[in-house]
Amino acid sequence: MNSVPKFFKYTFSFIVVSGIAGVLAIAGLYFYIKPDLPSVETLKDVRLQTPMKVYTSDGKLISQFGVKRRIPLKLEEAPQRLIEAVLATEDSRFYEHPGIDPIGIVRAAINLILTGEKGQGGSTLTMQLARGFFLTRDKTYIRKLKEIFIAWHIERVLSKDEILQLYLNKVELGHRAFGFGAAAQVYYGKNLNELSLAQIATLAGLPKAPSTLNPISRPERSVNRRKVVLSRMLSEKYITEAEYISSSNEPVTASRHGAEIELDAPYLANVIYKEMIELYGKEEAETGGYQVFATAPYELQKAAQAAVKQNLHDYDERHGYRGPVRQLWRKSDPDAQTDAPNLVTPEMAWSEQKIINYLKNKPSYKPLIPAVVTDVYEQAISVIDKQGRYHHIDWDGLAWARPFISDSKQGKEPRTASDIVSEGAHIYIRQRAEDQQWQLSQFPEASGALVSLDPNNGAVRALVGGYSFYQSQFNRATQAKRQVGSNIKPFLYSAALDEGYTIASIINDAPINQWDRSSGRAWRPENSPPRYDGPIRMRVALGQSKNVVAVRLLRAVGIDNVRRHMQQYGFELDDLPRDESLSLGSASITPLEVANGFATIANGGFAVQPYFIERIETQFGEFVWQANPLTACPVCDQDENLTAQLNLPTAEQAPISEPLPPRAEQVITAQNVFLVKEMLRTAVTGAGSWKNKTFWQGTGWRANNILKRKDLAGKTGTTNDSKDTWFSGFNPNLVATSWVGFDDPSRSLGRTSSNRYLKKKYGDKANWIGNGMSGGEDGAKSAQPAWIRFMQVALRDLPVQDKVIPDGVVQVRIDRTTGKLTSRTDHTSKFEYFISGTEPTEFVSSNDVFDPADKQSELSEEEDDIF
């Protein structure tokens, strides 16, 4: 009888000892694993690794950086149906257990005993969250123990709602989407609150196996998984039987969607991305959820991109068509050539599906779309694009395509469509911006760039580094150091003013013939065009971009003095050659640096620094950083008129909470740059005539003819053999520089012969975009049209700014021929500006020669001010 009490005694002792041993074992495991467990602070400071988004200054998304796509949401923003679907499928007892579900763990243990396999069961939402944050997906015992302990930690320091919110934002859902907010955009291109029950159920089924259950990669398996989710929701009484049936039978509607980019501006975005990496490091920049706002507004950036692309197409059209990308087949014709270049095979016409399959992987470079010619008519063609859409292109979209022979030679103008293409040709087409009609096109071989700055603080208002970032990531606006040609002359003339010259100083515009002992030949710099006017005022010389005058000024001022002066405009001394070629623009400088130099002229002589980022915010819109740039004349206490012009507050007007921005250093006197601006106004608006016959125009006259504003100034630039072409110009509130050339710096932009079709098509517009006109490429013809198109948008709603004359500048009446004082008030004289103390003191005599080439037959007060 004593055996029974002993049995219970031993059993009880065994249970107690086993319990103690179990507790000790768990405690031992805990202390063994504890060094690898995250701290409470880490758990509370969990980062969602949200991609960086880049916006225009007015909030339009232009790019996104980071592998993981995430759109954070708060729990109250999540649809109730989504919460129900997730809880029903992943953890129906979520609000009841302490982070570890014993029932689920027992179920997983039984599965292990019966099958010998370590399954995925037993994981609560909290455990999945722990795994996603800190662990791998390896199915090991130690990982499961760590998962349990981390889940227990999480439950101690976070509320159930906080845990659920983290899960909804953190869980991996395939196709680089993390969190349900991102998944809704990736799979459906919608916000979560716009999804149907079937779509919500599809997303809720993804956490189990996002790569094999997603509706894009495995639509059939996704449908089955969706039914499982809906079935669990039905059993939990979250939905009705009718909702279950209708949602189960809905078709798959998912497709891959990217970020909702409102303006694709990759050159600008990439500059900002690199700056963010410098500030925060690559990982933090790409995962910190930063919202970065550029200094460029949407409309200006959009206009700059459109201007550069259209300008390059204009250049391309006037130089001729280089032929199809490839000839896929030729129509059966006894006279047809079967050994045509790029001919894939001389077989019969391809089927529609075969064409679409061929085009599917061919690149598109917006606005260029790959297409194949299916029919050729007398003066029209039909094409099919990669989407299977047919387009009709009439003669207006074809007639430009005379054959390209070389950069300086074009073939005969076509008369029929068959002179241009044939059936089976793989070509590019695009829609014209002005009328949305389709036309034959091609990828431009020439490159272009445009950059625009606010001259008062250096904010970059637009930046375009080439035709297509996806074809070439080389940013010509910030990286391409190219010879600047006559764009350098304003800075040379500025140096001359500092050495006592005036804009009425007379320089001899006569040929130079100098023997160069080192090369063993004569150096003969020439004007372009090669016209020489003899003694000429500096204002007119810069307006007409006289090369020999620039050389003479450089010699008079001294090369070293000129280089040091140019350095004040922000140019690197090493980029400025120490020889006389500097006067003709042999310096190699980026468009951004050129624009910044012109900004100093525009803003009154202050050195501002270009910057691209206006402010940085967190993913929730919280302030992180705000630009505080050096600003040209922020107080302007020396000139109230200039303060008003720049829209800047005085010290008394500035709010206490908004301190004035730091003042930029004045590196050139206000009087000097005012006179340079005056000469550059002549380059844009100046013209010389006698008895109604025009003798000369400023090289930038097209800007004045099209924009019709009197607050513009600018300068063309063309290098030897037209290898680089430029136009830089400004008004008081905006500077822009346009460049066009080939990436191969040895290749000339060439010449074009007259084209009757292009003349007829563009009419008066042909004069300023250059299409249809014969002659060589130069800054006015190649680069300036992009500047004009951009400024048409940028200045559209801005009033013309009045001229502000700084202190220390006086006006006297001078003789137009000699630059001396005159008492005459007719067309031979004008009022001219001078730095006080430099105005002429000698009156013109009757012996001075009268030159009608620099006179006006009739002058308005406004014209008298300019010429």
Image (cartoon, helix red, strand yellow):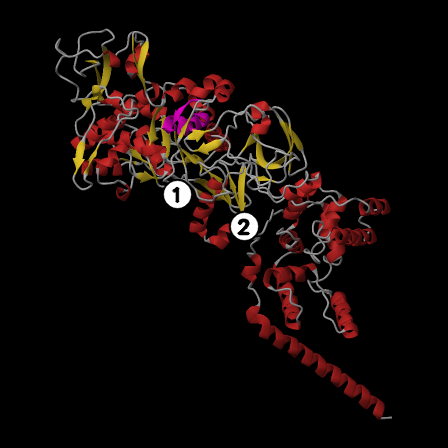
Residue 350 numbered tag: none
Report the residue at 17% width, 8% height from top: 823
Residue furthest right as drawn: 1
Quadrant housing residue 592: top left
Q: Label 1 is placed on what type of residue?
A: Gln
Residue 415 visible in image: yes
> Decide: marks 2, 1 in contact (CB < 8 A)?
no
Q: Which residues are magenta?
A: 773-791
Residue 373 percent location from the top left of the image? 63, 34
Report the residue at 35% width, 41% height from top: 481
Residue beneath label 2, please? 66
Q: Say which label, 2 or 1, has the lower sequence index.
A: 2
CA–CA distance in space, label 2 to label 1: 24 Å
Q: Is residue 787 magenta?
A: yes
Report the residue at 33% width, 39% height from top: 589
What quarter of the picture does the N terminus occupy?
bottom right
Residue 627 percent location from the top left of the image? 41, 40
Between residues 427 and 323, which one lies in front from this camera angle?
323
Between residues 796 and 100, which one lies in front from this camera angle?
796
Q: Is residue 336 above or below residue 7?
A: above
Residue beneath label 1, please? 479
Residue 501 percent location from the top left of the image? 18, 25
Q: Magenta stretch mostly in which secondary structure?
A: helix
